[in-house]
Amino acid sequence: MAADVSALPEDECTLFNALPTDGSSVSNPSLRQYLHWNRNRYFLARDGLVDKGLVTRGRGRGGVVRRSQPETTAAGHVVAVVVEGGTPDTETLEAAFTNEPALYEPMRAVIERDWAQEHRQDLLAVEITAFGGSRPTGIWSRPDITTVEVRTFEYVPGKHLDVNTFEIKSPNTVNVQAVYEALAHRRAATRSYVLFYIPPDQAAALKQDVEDVAAAARMHGIGVVTAGDPYNYDTWEELEEADRTVPDPEKLNDFIGEQLTEQTRILISRRLR
């Protein structure tokens, strides 16, 4: 049965009708390009459809969406097709990102803006925690990037603190050790990810290594993300979704006290009151 979209707001109706009727997935960048909408307009309409149960989010480059209930006898035509974004200048990118620290700031900015919007996160802070100044920590205990969110739910009482960590890796360090580093972070985090920079011209050569890492990550509930361009979320792909865990409160408290800035600690305290 076709969904009744007659009562939807105009933008939600337009976006819904742009999706393939057979339930095929389409990337967010493709739909934005097709509709000629800016990010805020697009995600406002997309989130409205998700909340109404008409559209389902999925993993894919730049994030993907599809109709929740495909029309098995669809007579309509598909108006939106998956079109990848422009190819990055790989020589320039690879020259700039010869070491991991160079990746931190562009990836932090994308996580704060695009990753958060795609994952519907209202982030309180996104910090580069790789350096940590003189704060003492053990081996593998300091993630490269950390996000903080305080969530509330309509039917679940209280406020819920989410601390997610990202272990950033350059192309020459694509191996399963990254999974165990992320696993060490998760002792005091809600979700932990490995985020690899994989230049397009190295993707084929690194394919098996990435698959091996994804398989190991799947066993431990660690998320795996690849980025063809650290600056461009349309080239990011979430290969494995991170499992949500509830860390020991004492370990989480110590992590916040040792790893995050005073400004973020104050924000957390205020939001949890």
Image (tube, grey):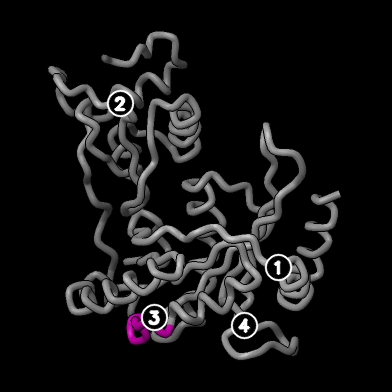
Do the residues under discs 2 and 4 have CB atoms within 8 angstroms?
A: no
The tag earlier along the polypeptide, 3 or 4, is 4
Q: CA distance from mark 3 to mark 4?
A: 19 Å
- The residue where tag 2 is placed is 69
**Element assignment for label 3:** loop
- Nearer to us of marks 2 and 1 is 1
- Nearer to us of marks 1 and 4 is 1
Q: CA distance from mark 2 to mark 4?
A: 44 Å
- The image's mark for residue 141 is 4
The tag earlier along the polypeptide, 2 or 1, is 2
Do the residues under discs 2 and 1 have CB atoms within 8 angstroms?
A: no
The tag earlier along the polypeptide, 1 or 4, is 4
Amino acid of disc 2? Gln
Where residue 46 sits: x, y (%)? 43, 32
Taking the magenta stretch, the answer to whether it contains residue 172 is yes
- Nearer to us of marks 3 and 4 is 4
Q: CA distance from mark 2 to mark 3?
A: 40 Å
Amino acid of disc 1? Asp
Q: Residues within 10 Å of mark 2 (few under 14, many from 20)?
A: some
Name the residue rendered at 66%, 71% in the picture. Answer: 188
- The residue where tag 3 is placed is 170
Name the residue rendered at 73%, 89% in the picture. Answer: 136
- Nearer to us of marks 2 and 3 is 2
- The image's mark for residue 248 is 1
Splitting the image into 4 quarters, where does residue 207 fall? bottom left
Q: Which residues are magenta?
A: 171-177
Query: Is 56 located above or below residue 254 in the figure?
Result: above
Q: CA distance from mark 3 to mark 1?
A: 31 Å
